[in-house]
Image: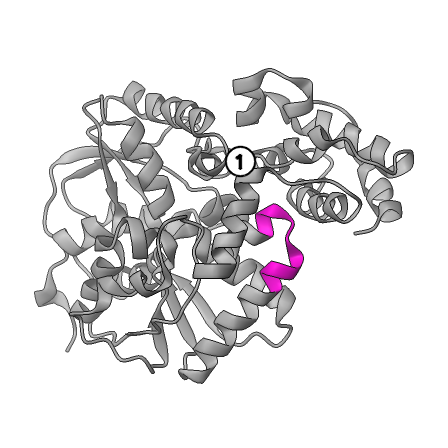
Amino acid sequence: MNIDNLSEILQNCGSCNYCRDTCPMYIELKSELDSPGGKLRALRAYATKMRNPPIALLQKLYCADCRRCEAICPAGVPVTEIWHDAKAQLIKTGGEMPETLQKVLAWIEKEGTPFIGFEAEERSVWAEDLDLPEESTTAIFSGCMGSFWYPDQPETIVDMLHKFNVNAGYVPKEICCGLFNYWAGDDKGFEEVVRKNYEMFKKAGVDHIVTGCGGCYGTLAEHYPHIIPDFDIKILHTVEVLVDMVRNGVLTFGELEGSYTLHDGCHLGRALGIYEPPREIINAIPGLEFVEMKNNRDKSNCCGGFLSVLDPEIAESVGRRRVAEAEELGVDGIITTCVSCYKNLSYNAKDTKLKVIQLDELILDKALSSQVEE
C-alpha cells in the first residue's frame, strides 16, 4: 500500500465511532488516538499531508490486532490490512517500531523464536522421546508457545492424533510462523520466515500441517499464500480434524460433569470464521453443560494475550475483563482453542474459581478410544 491508495481507502471511514467502544485499547486507555477511528483519521492526515510521521502514530498501530473493530464496521473498512500496510509504510518513511519489538524481531532472526532467552536447539525438546518421523505427509506445527512455554500442548496433539490412527511427523527445524514479523510491519523479515518454513516442510514431504495454536494457524493459512502464490500445503487446526471425527461417529466421549463456556480466539474466529466446530465438539460431550458468553463468535472480546509482548499491564487488564465475563455466568471453567489465549486467560483466572482448559486436552481426557475405527 502506498501513500496515495492509503488515502483513498481511508475515505471509506465515516467516523461513526461504532468501533470505539468495542476496542480493547480504547477501553483501557480512553485516548482517541487509541481508538480505531482516531488512528484512521490520523493516518488519513499522514497520507494526504505529512511526509515525516510522528513516532507516536506508528506506536499506536501496535494494538491487540483482534479485528473487533473490523467486524463491527458498517462500511467494511479493512482495518487489519490497513494497520499492517500502514506500519510497513511508516517504517519505510522514517518511523521506528518500539525497542522491545525490535529486540523480539532480532531474536526471531537469530534463534527462530520471539521468546528472548530461548534458543533454537530447545525448540524440539518436547518431541525427543516421541519417536516422530522428520519426514511425513502430515506434520505437527508446534509453534513457539507450544515448543517453549507449554510443551504438553503439542504432546497432547500427537497423543490425540495417534489415538485416532492419524500418523503425524514433526519437522524439528521449524521456526516461528512469522506472526510477530507480520504484525510489526516487517515485510522483509516475514517473507524470509515464510520461505524458510515452506522450504523445510516441502523438503520433508509435508502436504498437511496440524496445529493447536490459533495464531500460528491464522498466519499459516491466511498470510503464507500471499508470499507463496502456489502454496500447496493444507493447514488444519486441531478442531477441524476432530470435528470431522465427531460428525463421522469416529470420536465419542465419556461423560463430563460441570458447566463450561467457550472463548472464541481472535485468530481462529474473526480472522478465519471458525466458530461452530469447537461448539459441535463441546456439545457432543455428554453431561457437559455449555453456556455461551454474552460476547461470542464475531463479537467475542479479545483475551489480551498478544499485547503481553509490548504492554503486559494492558494485556492483564484485557484478560481480566474477559475472565470476568465468564465469572458472571457462574460456570466452572473456560474452554479455549488457542494456547496463547490459554496462557493469558489462565493467568488472569488464577484468583478465581474458574478452570481454564484447552479443548485438545479435554478431548484427549474424555475421548473413548474403543469407539475409534481400526
**Where residue 12 sits: x, y (%)?**
81, 37
- Quarter holding residue 289: top left
Q: At which x and y percent is residue 264?
A: 41, 40
Q: Amino acid at mark 1?
A: Ala
- Residue 370 percent location from the top left of the image: 8, 66
Residue drawn at x 61%, y 77% as measured from the top left: 230
Mark 1 highlights which residue?
Answer: 64
| Residue at the extreme top | 30
Magenta region, residue range? 182-191
272 inside magenta stretch? no
At x 28% / y 40%, what residue is drawn?
Answer: 335
Q: Nearer the viewer, residue 295 or 338?
A: 338
- Can residue 177 be spotted in the picture? no
- Magenta stretch: helix, strand or loop mostly: helix
Element at label 1: loop
Does 303 sit left or right of 284 as displayed?
right
**Is 186 in the magenta?**
yes
